[in-house]
Amino acid sequence: MAKKDVNEMSFLDHLEDLRWHLIRICLAVIIVATLAFIFSRFIFDQIIFAPLRMSFPTYHFLCQAANFIGVDTTFCAEKMPMIIQNRTMAGQFSADIWTAILGGFIISFPYVIYQLWKFISPGLHDSERKHSRGFIIISSLLFFLGVLFGYYIVTPLSLNFLANYSISDVVDNQIDISSYIALVRSSALASGLIFELPIIIYFLTKIGLVTPQILKKYRKYALVIVLILSAVITPPDIASQVIVAIPILILYQVSIYISKIVVRNQLRKEKQQQTVK
């Protein structure tokens, strides 16, 4: 049966169409998650637990930088002062399952975006679809950059700070596996979603909820929000917050530029339509 034209589809038809797109997304995530579960030993040893080793690239770079300027730092320690342990019967199994699902979502993110785009694109004009042709590539690239930023910057900074923070020598850091994985997961996923800001601004501008003037007017408030976000996803030290805040502020400036382009194209299109009339 041929697919109905978008203008002929009822509300229930749209819901049915959305349901099938969501089913395809779930199937893709499950398939990739199954593969991740099969190779879970490699994923945990080489990826998840890699920031526990002081040979991690971020620690090595920061240690070299500290030595260059002659500053003592915990980034040059021989090992991380913490032990990962499991305190529940199903703790390791649950960690394996949820890590596989998260890995399935991250790896299949381009397909997730593709399915969402397939649902949205029929409602756009031909010219809008043409100008949005690189949407899947750009949004996927931004997401993966955000995940890498969260993994290589936010995670090690948070881990090093929290592992070396001590209120007394009496207390040892014996961290439950669920707590550790939650830190890695939230740092990577939150950063990946934050890096989607230019895409979000693009669509908000397209539907008229945001303009470049609004973004400029509330820039100082955005700065406060960025600092709050940085404080939420990083440890409470100034250096880590600044490191995280810088790329977010850059993304905000890029979003302003994208909003300008969208508004400029809309005005040009309106002038062309008036000229034709």
Image (spheres, helix red, strand yellow):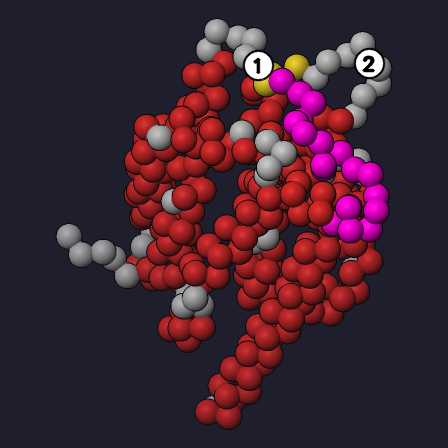
Seen in the picture, residue 1 relative to 31 is either above or below; the reply is below
Identify the amino acid type marked 1.
Gln
Q: Is residue 152 left or right of residue 242?
A: left
**Residue 259 in the image: x percent, y percent?**
62, 69
Seen in the picture, residue 174 relative to 116 is either above or below; the reply is above
Q: Which residue is mark 2?
A: 169
**Residue 43 in the image: x percent, y percent?**
43, 32
> Magenta segment: does it hold 135?
no
Residue 116 visible in the picture: no
The label on residue 138 is none
Q: Which residues are magenta?
A: 65-83
Q: Which structural element holds mark 1?
A: strand
Marks counted in the figure total 2
Q: Is residue 55 left or right of residue 212?
A: left
Between residues 253 and 18, which one lies in front from this camera angle? Answer: 253
Q: Is residue 78 left or right of residue 50?
A: right
Identify the amino acid type marked 2.
Asp
Q: Circle 2: is it few (<14), some (14-19), or many (20+) Cα within 10 Å?
A: few
Q: Residue at x 54, y 33 (%)?
A: 50
Q: Residue at x 72, y 63 (%)?
A: 215
Between residues 141 and 205, which one lies in front from this camera angle? Answer: 141
**Residue 183 in the image: x percent, y percent?**
62, 30
Q: CA distance from mark 2 to mark 1?
A: 20 Å
Q: Of the two numbered discs 2 and 1 on the same chain, state the one appearing first in sequence.
A: 1
Q: Which residue is mark 1?
A: 85
Q: Residue at x 84, y 15 (%)?
A: 168
Q: Is residue 203 left or right of residue 157?
A: left
Q: Which structural element holds mark 2?
A: loop
**Residue 258 in the image: x percent, y percent?**
60, 69
Between residues 150 and 194, which one lies in front from this camera angle? Answer: 150
Seen in the picture, residue 92 relative to 249 is either above or below; the reply is above
